[in-house]
Amino acid sequence: MIARASLAAVVVALALGAGFAASPARAEKLIVSVSNHRVTVTPNYSGEELVLFGSVEKDASTPATRTSYDLVVTVSGPRADIVTRRKERKLGIWINTDSRQFLQVPTYLALFSNRPFDAIASPEVMRRQQLGLNNVLLTQRVGPDYADVVPNDPFRSAFVRLRAQHGLYREETSAVTFLTPTLFRTGIPLPGEVPIGTYDVEIKLFADGALVTKTETAFEIVKVGFEQFVANSARNNGFFYGLATAFMALMTGWMASIVFRKD
């Protein structure tokens, strides 16, 4: 019995040792922070820019030949289902002829780097690490199936283009600046119509075309004041909010009829 127990202990120890050996030790560590972790949206909010800054910490196991790095920052906002429609002109009228639903995609998506993505990594690494808007997974409902499609799919292209026109999807390959070989910063622009919610920020460090390490942080966008009251009322008391909205619309129409009434 004792021999069996000892043998089992040896097997467990070897398995743990093999597990630790299989996971390579990271020679670098990322230390990052955002200038503001809570952005408040007021009635006169027109957008702002946050600053992400950080540094690369090396240790004794960092290769002496590793002197330069590449950095990719991905900022993704709250996820939601979004429908993109195709319009065609028929009999002089523009009508919706087809649509595609994008499932739980980021309402805000920004990718920043210190140089072009294809100069940072190979096409395979770019696809695996989702570097660039063309490589980010945007799941669609295609008939009965769910899948991401090729970047030049007309619905996907239109979806990304429309989001980019409003500043909600962006890709900038010279936005990350290395102030020193290990100290970096980048700006995160937030447009006036930025969605409310939690934003995840993923920072990936590359060297010689390979991912070295990564880390994450986050910030939150919230409404305050009257807008927050309206949002909470619509979310928590939908029925009474609808009645109040209908009453205000009727009162506005009644007041307009009095003001512009012709005697």
Image (cartoon, rainbow, N blue to C red):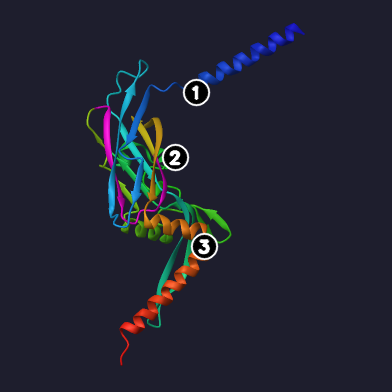
State whether residue 142 appears in this view: yes
> Which residue shows up at 69% across the image and 8% down it?
6
Q: CA distance from mark 1 to mark 2?
A: 19 Å
The mark lying in front, picked from 2 and 3, is: 3
Which residue position is annotated with label 2?
128
State whether residue 93 appears in this view: no
| Labels 2 and 3: the sequence-earlier one | 2
Magenta stretch: give its range: 181-201
Which quarter of the rendered picture does the N terminus lie within? top right
Q: Is residue 9 above or below residue 217?
A: above
Quarter occupied by residue 144? bottom right
What is the count of numbered marks? 3
Q: Which mark is residue 23?
A: 1
Dot 2: what SS?
helix
Q: CA distance from mark 1 to mark 3?
A: 51 Å
Dot 3: what SS?
helix
